[in-house]
């Protein structure tokens, strides 16, 4: 078998699984259905066929540190460092991401095969998924671009459809693609029997994909061929020349080399809380539960809690999702309206749209404990050996109190150590940094005071994570 590579698409910011999924904490980085995040689960089902040095993650630069940490947690830091990461400042849809990946594969292996997969999908039957990959190899070797088709379980307006045509080696030529249909049209496609849901997962020879893309997207390919394929250091410059387009519209719907492999692998794009309920394991009352839940006389519900107790009584056919700072309650069958809720939060500039109360950072995390018009209180955790950037603020001063561990503080020209129950004050417009020189967690309470409490009030001078221009 030729070497197999993986192009994992991890840049999306889903909104339909709010309040767990947020703009800066999207569903692929969240534990939605089990102990692993959807991103980790994607890597887990691929790693037996694709070693880490043949995996490319294409993602947003907002997520790159969290992705590296999650992959390290899954396979170890040494293995995670073997992966390649392309961090986009501004995404350009799936065509540039997948085609950049195809060029990356081709630069490493002229005969390489690749699977391009979203990181926010769920596949329950990993063995059948592996069999679907194996059955695609011969088709890809004959210069077909394979997509995986899921036999529809019902008429559904939320998926694109693929019509299967002439059979080829266990697959079918794609006769046509159809975008998300009306309900009436979806019923017609369902009854036809020759249509499949488009999973958005692709398998191809890198050589064939590049060849077809040069035919149908010549300008895009001319730009992408300027990429630094070692570490994608110039991806933002290259992307500035490119218009957004999906791989379906840009290549798959135009080429005569598209093929579909039917797959019954327990696939879901995890597009709504209703789909989470459908996929979940039900208890004797028909409830799907996770977290700290107490339920009385409640049936056929999805109940997801956080660390605090979520107690419900007398409910039926209801979705309850509780987080530290937001609670969602809606009827089953109504979860598509979550997007409308998120639109309202975004339009009102609400923080609950952007992130959770606890925000992960490359050096650790912080949790907002309280805030008012002129102050904010945070709990900050700094991992051993890590340090925040050297920075200053133009609109606020800060007080730090060490509650656990040892802190090394830079304030102006001074550098000094603080132990538990010691504190310091950082005046307005003063360069400062805090770091953890110890081998255990550093925890501090930070109090901001000023007339602008935005996270954007920060000027960086040095940062070990390369965030001088990226906050």
Image: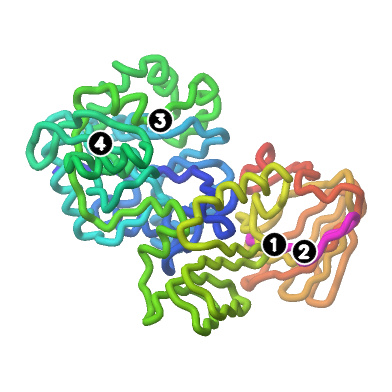
The residue under the point 32% across, 17% down is 216
Residue 396 covered by magenta stretch: no
Give whichever of discs 2 and 3 has the lower sequence position: 3
* Disc number placed over residue 162 in the picture, else none: 4
Residue 372 covered by magenta stretch: yes
Q: Residues within 10 Å of mark 1 (few under 14, many from 20)?
A: many
* Disc number placed over residue 378 in the picture, else none: 2
What whole-number distance in Å separates the C-alpha atoms at marks 3 and 1? 36 Å
What whole-number distance in Å separates the C-alpha atoms at marks 2 and 4? 50 Å
For this rendering, which residue is in front, 49 or 11?
A: 11
> Image height check: is 262 above or below 267?
above
For this rendering, which residue is in front, 83 or 287?
A: 287
Question: Which region shows up in magenta?
Answer: 363-376
The residue under the point 41% across, 20% down is 220
Give whichever of discs 2 and 4 has the lower sequence position: 4
State the image coordinates of residue 243 (x, y, percent, origin top left).
49, 22
Determine whether the residue tagged by mark 4 lies in a helix, strand or loop: strand
**Contact flag, marks 1 and 2 (Cβ < 8 Å):** yes
What whole-number distance in Å separates the C-alpha atoms at marks 4 and 3? 16 Å
């Amino acid at each position: 078998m030729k070497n197999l590579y993986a192009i994992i698409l991890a840049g999306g910011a889903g909104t339909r699984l709010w309040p767990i999924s947020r703009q800066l904490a999207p569903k692929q980085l969240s534990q939605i259905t089990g102990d692993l995040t959807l991103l980790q689960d994607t890597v887990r089902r691929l790693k037996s066929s694709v070693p880490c040095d043949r995996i490319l993650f294409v993602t947003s630069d907002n997520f790159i540190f969290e992705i590296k940490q999650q992959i390290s947690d899954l396979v170890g830091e040494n293995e995670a460092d073997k992966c390649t990461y392309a961090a986009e400042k501004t995404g350009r849809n799936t065509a540039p991401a997948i085609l950049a990946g195809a060029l990356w594969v081709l630069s490493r292996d002229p005969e390489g095969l690749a699977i391009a997969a979203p990181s926010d999908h769920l596949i329950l039957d990993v063995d059948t998924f592996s069999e679907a990959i194996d059955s695609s190899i011969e088709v890809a070797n004959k210069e077909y671009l394979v997509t995986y088709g899921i036999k529809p379980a019902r008429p559904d307006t939320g998926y694109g459809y693929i019509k299967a045509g002439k059979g080829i080696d266990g697959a079918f030529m794609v006769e046509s693609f159809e975008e998300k249909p009306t309900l009436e049209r979806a019923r017609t496609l369902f009854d036809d029997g020759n249509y499949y849901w488009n999973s958005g997962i692709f398998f191809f020879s890198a050589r064939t994909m590049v060849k077809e893309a040069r035919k149908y997207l010549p300008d895009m390919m001319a730009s992408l061929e300027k990429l630094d394929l070692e570490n994608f250091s110039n991806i933002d410059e290259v992307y500035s020349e490119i218009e957004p387009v999906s791989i379906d519209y840009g290549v798959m719907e135009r080429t005569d080399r598209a093929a579909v492999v039917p797959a019954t692998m327990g696939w879901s794009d995890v597009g709504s809380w209703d789909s989470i309920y459908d996929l979940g394991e039900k208890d004797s009352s028909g409830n799907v539960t996770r977290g700290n839940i107490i339920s009385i006389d409640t049936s056929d519900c999805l109940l997801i809690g956080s660390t605090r107790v979520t107690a419900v009584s007398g409910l039926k056919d209801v979705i309850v999702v509780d987080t530290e700072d937001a609670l969602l309650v809606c009827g089953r069958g109504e979860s598509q309206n979550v997007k409308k809720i998120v639109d309202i939060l975004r339009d009102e500039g609400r923080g609950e749209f952007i992130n959770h109360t606890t925000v992960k950072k490359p050096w650790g995390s912080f949790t907002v404990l309280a805030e008012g018009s002129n102050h904010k209180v945070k709990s900050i955790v700094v991992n051993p050996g890590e340090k925040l950037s050297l920075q200053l603020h133009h609109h606020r001063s800060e007080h730090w109190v060490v509650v656990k561990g040892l802190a090394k503080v830079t304030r102006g020209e001074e550098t000094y150590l603080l132990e538990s129950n010691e504190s310091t004050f950082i005046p307005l417009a003063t360069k400062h940094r805090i770091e953890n020189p110890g081998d255990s967690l550093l925890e501090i309470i930070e109090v901001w005071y000023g007339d602008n409490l935005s996270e954007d009030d920060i000027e960086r001078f040095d940062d070990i994570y390369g965030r001088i221009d990226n906050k």
